Amino acid sequence: MTRSENPGERRFHYTYVDCLRGDFDAPSSEGEGTLFQTLFVVGMATTMILFVNVVVHPAPSFDPLALLASFPLWFCIAFTVRSLFANRLSFWLLDKICGGRREGVGVSAVLVLVNVCIMAPVMCAIGVTLSGVPLGAFAGAYVGTLPLAAAAAYALCFLVVRPLVMLVFSNACKPLLARMRQAG
């Protein structure tokens, strides 16, 4: 089923384009919100770890196991930053910029931009710090990494991670959760 004729009616199938517009079966409880945020952070952490370590700062000898081992740390850091302040600040700014509207490609683009403007500088500073760059070279490494990482984060989040997480959440997680509730 594609677009519903009745606004507010739960549809049974959401498409990539629906999710790009921000039209999806949104979390309706705190538990669902946590699941959605977890899926989102897993997606962004994975894409950004790969992008930064393969494209921005490729190591002379690529070690996929070391990259995989770093994932739990990056996931925990990103989840904590989003939980402590980034989510609330993003939606507060979105409401100021978009006047409370939450659907449409333009609103989705603004929300992703606001998220990236909050998350990218914080995550880049943490990444440069954890990379072991000497204090005297921190500013150069930070300035050399942030623009490319932020641009990639915007494109990857807007075009890949966000819509795919919305698709998975709406078309798989929500129906599964509903069946689990019905089963008792």
Image (cartoon, rainbow, N blue to C red):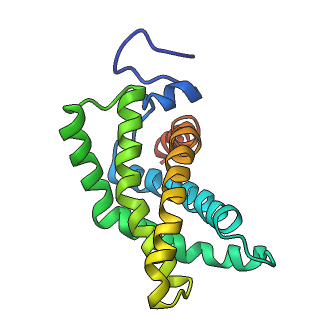
Asked whether the viewer can see residue 23, the reply is yes
**Residue 50 point in image, percent of width and height:** 67, 63
Q: Which of 24 and 97 is in front in this view?
A: 97
x and y, in percent, of residue 151 in the image: 51, 50
Point out residue 179 in the picture as x, y percentages from the top left corner.
53, 40
The residue under the point 46% across, 68% down is 143
**172 displayed left or right of 140:** right
**Front in this rendered view, residue 33 or 18:** 18
Which percent across, then down, holds residue 85? Answer: 28, 63
Task: Check the image and report above or below for 5 versus 66.
Answer: above
Residue occupying the point 53% across, 86% down: 133
In the image shown, does 120 or 111 lie closer to the viewer?
Answer: 120
Q: Quick one: quadrant of the N terminus?
A: top right
Residue at the (51%, 75%) spot, across then down: 141
Image height of 64 relative to 177, above or below:
below
Query: In the rendered picture of this protein, how many numbered marks are placed on residues?
Result: 0
Residue 22 located left or right of residue 94: right
| Looking at the image, residue 143 lies above or below residue 66 | above
Residue at the outermost top position: 5
What residue sits 69% from the left and 73% below the top? 68
Q: Quadrant of residue 71?
A: bottom right
